[in-house]
Image (tube, rainbow, N blue to C red):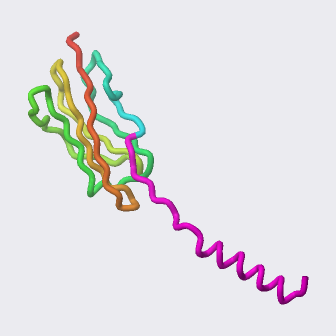
Amino acid sequence: MSSDRVVVVVLIVLGVGLLGPPPAHAHTFLDHAEPRVGSTVTTAPAAVSLTFTEPVEPSFCRVDVQDAHGQRITAGALENPKSDELRLPLPSLAPGDYTVHWVVISVDTHRTEGRFEFTVSAP
């Protein structure tokens, strides 16, 4: 193969590499939570901690906790101890069922939301 052909082949390969598929931007999903999704705990948690599959933008995120009657629990300020984690300090919770609703914006600007329940059992 002549050197001109080698140059053309190299340029084609580089061009295809540059024009290849764009990078994939996945949505952020809940990886795990404390208290665990659907769990029953015997001691009321001091906070709800949510860990996501990628970093989130805390200023654009929201986490709410509601009791079984749909009343929002007055909680502390949302914290961001790690780039992929949110923590919501809670007051002392009475025994009962609670729903956590979260809305997050990932660093790649995708919005996702979800909800889960946990129960605080009577001692």
Residue 29 spot, x, y in % from top left: 39, 45
Residue that lies at the very extreme toward the bottom in this rendered image: 4
State the residue in front, 57 or 11. Answer: 11
Give the position of the N terminus as an image quadrant. bottom right
| Occupied quadrant, residue 101 | top left
Residue that lies at the very extreme toward the top in this rendered image: 123
State the residue in front, 95 or 89. Answer: 95
State the residue in front, 91 or 65. Answer: 65
Tell me the residue at 21%/31% (across/down).
99
Q: Is residue 10 magenta?
A: yes
105 vs 30: above or below = below
Residue 49 spot, x, y in % from top left: 33, 37
Tell me the residue at 77%/85% (across/down).
8
Residue that lies at the very extreme toward the right in this rendered image: 1
Tell me the residue at 35%/39% (across/down).
50
Q: Magenta segment, which residues?
A: 1-30
